[in-house]
Image: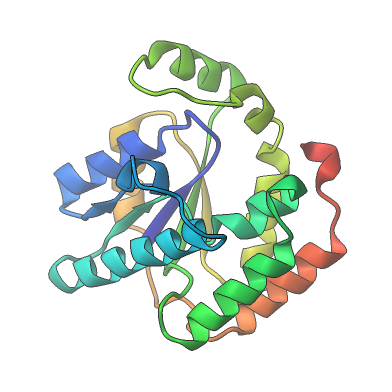
Amino acid sequence: MICLEGPSAVGKTTLARHLEERFGFPRVAEVNELFAGATRDGPTWYFDRQVERHGFAAAAIQRARSTVLDGDPFQPLWYNWIYPEFGPVTDAVHYYSKAIIGGHIAFPDCYVVLAAPREALRARKDGDRTRRRGNFERHLKMIEAQRRYFTALRDHAGVAVHFIDNIQTAATAARIADLPRAAGPKSTAALQIIADWLAAQPAAEFA
């Protein structure tokens, strides 16, 4: 199970679709696409949908060499760290801890965190009339904090994370398809390690 992450307009969705079409890796869309029009009912609605996405990916891997998550199912951990107004990180940790113990979610086998120059991101955003990218400029400011999170997830929690510059879709997809993959951590140990790291690190200056 591969998870694509990175800033807005970096090409996650385009790349995920290419991996599906060229390599047969089923794509699981991000929450806002997959559940477009759904009523957001209850404080855990967004968390629940992330768990569902992981379930879809886990089911699809039974019929394919790999699957691709278009966006991190654990996104509230780092997003709420960067933007605390969306809720305490401790709430996200508590939710995910229970979900992991229940066998409903686990960290992906590997993350691919995509990057591109900011000028290229702005150009891609301006050239794509099919999507509305709210708070685009604000989200550009979180690039460094997001990279710090995924570096810590790799270095401290032992989750496989690869940082790749996404310059050309086909070349990036071929590189991802050849990445080594092993099962991601299934226990809460990695979650607790990254939770402790988040609690000790400030992120507000990047947001």
Q: Quadrant of the C terminus?
A: top right
- Tell me if residue 163 comes above or below residue 12 in the rendering: below
Instruction: For residue 1, say whether it is visible.
Output: no
Residue 141 placement: quadrant: top right
Relative to 67, 82 lies left or right? right
Instruction: For residue 196, say whether it is visible.
Output: yes
Of 165 and 114, nearer the camera is 114
Q: In which quarter of the image is the N terminus?
A: bottom left
Residue 128 x %, y %? 38, 17
Relative to 15, 189 lies left or right? right
Relative to 34, 155 lies left or right? right
Residue at coordinates 64% horizontally, 50% vertically from top-left? 79
Residue 197 placement: quadrant: bottom right
- Tell me if residue 115 comes above or below residue 163 in the rendering: above
Residue at coordinates 60% horizontally, 56% vertically from top-left? 76
Instruction: Give the total number of marks visible in the rendering.
Output: 0
- Tell me if residue 178 comes above or below residue 7 in the rendering: below
Which color scheme does this rendered protein use? rainbow
Residue 176 x %, y %? 35, 51
Residue 144 x %, y %? 71, 41
Residue at coordinates 33% horizontally, 47% vertically from top-left? 35
Residue 136 x %, y %? 59, 25
Of 146 and 23, nearer the camera is 146
